[in-house]
Image (cartoon, rainbow, N blue to C red):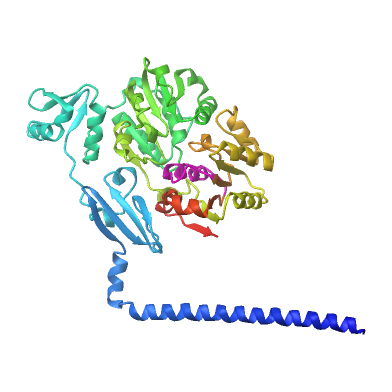
Amino acid sequence: MSEFDIADVLKKVNEALAKLEEFKRSIEVLQAQIRSDFERKIELFRFSQVKKEFLEAFFEEPYLIIPKRANEWYVIAPKWLNFSIGWLERSTKSYNIFVVNRYVKWFSEIPPSLKEKFKFAEPMPFKVFNGILLTGKELREEAMRRYKHFITRCEGEDRLRIKKGYEFKLIAQMIEDGTLPFMPIPVREEDLRPWDGIKLRSYQQHAWNEFLNKGAIGVFWPFGSGKSLFGIYVLARVKGRKLVVVPTLTLKEQWLERINKYIPKYGHEIEVVTYHAYDKVKNNEYVLIIFDECQHLPANTFVRLATLRTKYRMGFSGSPYREDGRENYIIALTGFPIGMSWEELIRLQVVREPTFRVYILSDNREKMRKLSELLLTPVKTLIFCDWLNLGEKIAKTFNIPFIYGETKDRLDIIRGSQVCVVSRVGDEGLSLPGIERVIEVAFLHGSRMQESQRFGRLMHSTKEEPEHIILMTEEEFEKYQKRLYPIIERGFRIEFIR
């Protein structure tokens, strides 16, 4: 071996020894860090040792209830506990902080062990009917005291005349006070016809019976539980002119498709319009109006739709909450609320339980890299992207369709594509039994409503383990993580990956 070869070997050996020494130092630093963390936790444990005598009481009541304001409470529970109720307002490293108010008992079930903890205001026996507040003789003065801003005069000993145009406002205030003031108006026999094209599940049959008895209901079942098919059943059974109001053209297309599929012989009786179409229908009179995604109805631009002339009404929503807190108007504008717990529908295997993952990435370039990596797995996927420029870029990069406001035949394109990008036009009501994965790339900031609607698309899936994946930058996670709260408050677990 030449001197040159020996020198080269010695150089490589020295380089290897230097790297080994560097690795050794790294191991020592890591060992010191682990030792320090362990000693710190041991010390922490020493100063906060578990008092075993309190453990039994904790497991009997592992939450804290604190009054927030009248008829509203905070419920604080440790995150490791599989517990959710009401509206998740905040989440810390260790605890979930829920808010429970009077609406929870109408939108979903409250565990029996908790019902007695909440001292909801007793409902008053008041009813609103045809511009009159019915009070009874004994409570007329009490009703006038409470609601004088909505009243124009007394009429007799047991009733008050409501100011013109104030009826829905009064109903909303009474709901805020814990009273459901609706007067049942049973569906008349002559407005019905026999039809058995859809077999109702037990909870759907219950809702139908409630509608027959009351004439106005709000159906607040989870996504994928069959609200739209129940609506088709109702449209078939009720005779005469009917209207379905929806938030998007995509949903209009889907309703028309279902009407043509299930009840084509009654299609001439049914109009389907968006919430923006008030001027087109304001002079019409209907036997029945269905407000789909009725959480939109209280908006200032849409609320006048509630004044359309109709005998009967019905509202559908899987997320009966609003960012402006006007949940009382959702009930006031639709009717008697009918809810059902997510847990029960999942137990009955009516809806699927998705898996949730949030990837927290450095920037938008990393989002595109992660999206490319995810798309290597070939499954039926919806990519949600709020921003048109980014949606077009994704579509061009991966050679897939982009569905947005100007797109025609949206449903055909979505169904015919293994992967496609969808703007906000796909947020609500879209039912795709074959969907296996949703990926959110861009979203409306901290909107809990949008997040509820988007993961709701997977509740319609017939696949065994549908996935919901959210790509967030560090900045987005810091600012907008409250949009994830609807997932947690439904009792689902999120895996966070950095």
Q: Nearer the viewer, residue 219 or 364?
A: 364
Q: Nearer the viewer, residue 189 or 156?
A: 156
Is 452 contained in the magenta span?
Answer: yes
Query: What is the magenta range?
Result: 442-463
Q: Residue at x 92, y 84 (%)?
A: 2
Q: Identify whether 367 is placed above or below 201.
A: below
As drawn, the residue found furthest toward the top would be 283
Rendered location of residue 174, percent (x, y): 21, 36
Rendered location of residue 236, percent (x, y): 44, 25
As drawn, the residue found furthest toward the right would be 2
Q: Residue at x 8, y 32 (%)?
A: 141
Residue 182 visible? The answer is no
Q: Residue at x 46, y 23 (%)?
A: 272
Which quadrant holds residue 82? bottom left
Q: Quadrant of the N terminus?
A: bottom right
Rendered location of residue 308, percent (x, y): 34, 21
Rendered location of residue 401, percent (x, y): 64, 36
